[in-house]
Image (cartoon, rainbow, N blue to C red):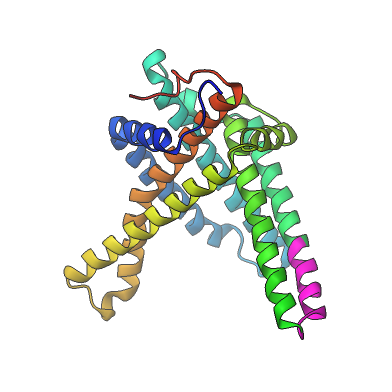
Amino acid sequence: MYHPFSIAETIKATWNTLKKNFVPLVVYSAISLFIYEAADFLKAFIFIGEDTLSQILTFFFQFIIQAYLTLSFYKLILTLIDSEYYEFEFKDILPSFRMTFNFLLIGVAYTILIGTLLFINKHIEMSIAEYDNILTIFRIVELCLLLFLLLRSIFCVCFIVDDDSSPYESLKQSFGITKDNFFKTLALLVIIIAYMAVVLLIIFIMFILFGFDEDSNEYLQKLMFYCWFIFTFPVVQVMIMVTYRKLVYSHLDVDDDIAETN
């Protein structure tokens, strides 16, 4: 293969992208957090019922907001990666209605799939509850299957943003680029989780050193979450998009000059 996928190159390209564009990425993350919090506040005045319809409407309201913010952030990252090749305007990072709709279809499909799996899982576990060893093996196999499905389909949103692909086409493309790089993608996922955990630990230690006590626990948790979000969300999303670009070029077996950010 002319340009095989490399974890080291992916991390290096991620760092270079973050180094060049840290301020706009953090600012957009803060704006996204503010919008989501505002939407969360407004839903209390829009959907006040406890019935099933209100819960469904609340779910879709939050989902649409999340979809739009996620897609626009992904478009921003791709635009920043390619910005040295062309000029762009604010409208260029706004997702189209088609992209948002396709994202929603993917989300609904996964919700139905996971709900169905949980339903089946509950009945299977009830039938083998008395066999501890078999139950343990079943849970491990179930976890592995879910992890496999997640990693093989994780880049479908990237294709929706970058190629304006349909839900089915984006899933097919995601499975295609991860076909020969499953364990490398898994390794990057472990790195991302480790980074998020380390940042959370550092923030927690710093807040303790600044003298926050139990009386300020609710305020502390909220502030800790905001700090953790601002310093992890941009990094994680850039890592995903850079990995996506690297996998695409590796799958095409061509050089990835456009994806490089050296």
Extent of the magenta region: 117-130
Q: Quadrant of residue 113?
A: bottom right
Q: Point out residue 52 in the picture as x, y percentages from the top left corner.
A: 73, 65
What secondary structure is the stretch in magenta mostly built from? helix
Image check: 200 left or right of 250?
A: left
Residue placed furthest toward the bottom: 130
Q: Residue at x 53, y 43 (%)?
A: 185
Q: Point out residue 117 in the picture as x, y percentages from the top left corner.
A: 76, 62
Magenta residue check for 140? no
Q: Point out residue 26 in the picture as x, y percentages from the top left corner.
A: 33, 41
Q: Residue at x 38, y 50 (%)?
A: 232
Pick the residue in front: 230 or 34: 230
Magenta residue check for 125? yes
Quadrant housing the N terminus: top right
Quadrant housing the C terminus: top left
Q: Quadrant of residue 180?
A: top right
Residue placed furthest toward the top: 86
Residue placed furthest toward the front: 1
Pick the residue in front: 9 or 199: 9
Pick the residue in front: 26 or 186: 186
Depicted 233 relative to depicted 137: above or below: above
* Residue 54 in view (yes/no): no
Q: Residue at x 47, y 37 (%)?
A: 73
Image check: 116 left or right of 145?
A: right
Image check: 242 left or right of 226?
A: right
Q: Point out residue 197 in the picture as x, y percentages from the top left corner.
A: 38, 60
* Residue 207 in view (yes/no): yes
The mark total stands at 0
